[in-house]
């Protein structure tokens, strides 16, 4: 099963909202890997100002807020 990566951090309200919206959309269709940017210096440097960030196949799908149309397109693809 293919997966989405979400770059996030603890106590990030936008991250929590995005994940709450994303999980039911992809359940049973895509794996979800949540990556805590505070656990990896490279992720932290790259994404600190932009979380949450959703990636699929190494391409950024959306930042800050969930792009429902982009996720629907991935699921159709």
Image (tube, rainbow, N blue to C red):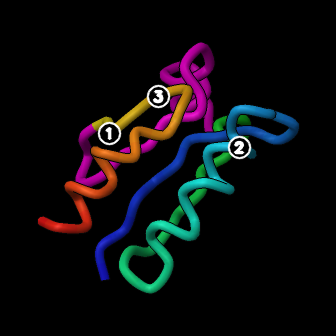
Depicted 50 relative to depicted 67: above or below: above
Instruction: Please tell me which of labels 2 and 3 falls first in the chain.
Output: 2
Q: Residues within 10 Å of mark 1 (few under 14, many from 20)?
A: many
Q: Secondary structure at mark 3?
A: strand
How far separated are the C-alphas under marks 1 and 2?
A: 16 Å
Tell me the residue at 32%/39% (across/down). Answer: 61
Task: Say left or right for 37 vs 42.
Answer: right
For the residue pair 60 and 65, the one nearer the viewer reads as 65
Magenta segment boundaries in residue numbering: 40-59
How far separated are the C-alphas under marks 1 and 3?
A: 7 Å
Task: Say left or right for 59 vs 20.
Answer: left
Q: Is residue 51 magenta?
A: yes
How far separated are the C-alphas under marks 2 and 3?
A: 12 Å
Tell me the residue at 56%/41% (across/down). Answer: 7
Q: Secondary structure at mark 2?
A: helix
The image quadrant that residue 1 belongs to is bottom left
Task: Say left or right for 41 vs 74.
Answer: right
- Residue where numbered disc 2 is placed: 17
């Amino acid at each position: 099963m293919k997966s989405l990566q979400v770059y996030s951090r603890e106590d990030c309200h936008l991250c929590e909202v995005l994940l709450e919206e994303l999980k039911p959309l992809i359940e049973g269709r895509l794996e979800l890997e949540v990556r805590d940017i505070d656990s990896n210096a490279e992720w932290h440097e790259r994404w600190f100002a932009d979380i949450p960030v959703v990636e699929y196949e190494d391409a950024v799908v959306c930042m800050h807020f969930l792009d429902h149309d982009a996720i629907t397109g991935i699921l159709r693809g």
